[in-house]
Amino acid sequence: MQTLRNYFTPWSSDVRLDGKTVVITGANTGIGKETAIDLAKRGMRVIIACRDMEKADEATKEIAEVSGNQNVVCKKLDLADSNSIREFAQNINSEEKQLNILINNAGVMACPYGKTADGFEMQIGVNHMGHFLLTFLLIDLLKRSAPARIVTVSSMAHKWGTINLDDINSEKSYDKSKAYSQSKLANVLFTRCLAKKLQGTGVTTYVLHPGVVQTELWRHMNRPQQAAIWLIKPFTKTSVQGAQTTIYCAVAPELETKSGNYYSDCAPANCSSAAMDDDVAQRLWDLSCQMLRITWD
């Protein structure tokens, strides 16, 4: 039986990135690993940033073997712990001469209520706060390496999200799906705000929906939700297909003068009206800086 999956063809480009360096969070599995393989094939030095180092070591070997590029390394990063993020960034800043692409790929989805080491609700903490802090700590290296790109993986779920600035950690009430959508909306607002702040630096930034991808992120869904997903599985993307828009945003030459836009299926896409709210974007930015105890004008 032919399915829609047959129509999700990989994005094709012969662009080489020899001598360039990329950091990809959560690249030991799924679309992150497929992105790493593609960029390794293009000649990049690939640094995969992962929480589970045993899985990361296995993924590193696989990426190197499949790509034929031995310049692939893994480093420990726990986005649920600001101390781990700072240690990782310090290592990158001290050991890497350049950073040409940062891909904020890692994420958690629809998990039971929990908090990060810093007291953030897990989904807003990992998906938004963790990547916000990581980007802040690596931004000077990215600027020195310009032209450089920052790519953040969001989701169409952002369209169902709202930013609750008065209860960003969902302490008054918690709905795991709403918290996920809030974190993905935060990704889009972060990218839009970041693009403005990076004007003239040679660093551009993009945010994307990878598609409905077969992923380990589904593991926290309840039985009815998983049953619904099984029904639509023939119309979902594989990890290879799901990685294509990330790769497109990281590689496509025509995007070099673009920044702050939202993409899906390797093309510009419409985001929600809430994602276009510059006032909320700035207020979320200010709140994030306050909660992370950083100053980023």
Image (spheres, helix red, strand yellow):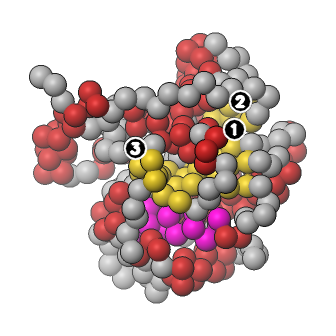
Please give the label number shown on residue 265. Answer: 3
Residue 3 versus residue 276 in the image, above or below = above
Q: Are marks 3 and 1 in contact (CB under 8 Å)?
A: no
Q: Is residue 215 visible?
A: yes
Q: Which secondary structure, mark 1?
A: strand
Q: Residues within 10 Å of mark 2 (few under 14, many from 20)?
A: some
Q: Residues within 10 Å of mark 3 (few under 14, many from 20)?
A: many
Q: Which secondary structure, mark 2?
A: loop
The residues colored magenta run 180-195
Residue 257 versus residue 168 in the image, above or below = above
Q: Which one is earlier in the sequence, the residue at label 1 or at label 2? A: 2
Q: Which one is earlier in the sequence, the residue at label 3 or at label 1? A: 1
Who is closer to the viewer here, 180 or 85? 180
Q: Quadrant of the C terminus?
A: bottom right
- Mark 3 and mark 1: Cα distance apart in space: 22 Å
- Mark 1 and mark 2: Cα distance apart in space: 10 Å
Residue 241: x %, y % from top left: 39, 32
Who is closer to the viewer here, 286 or 44? 44
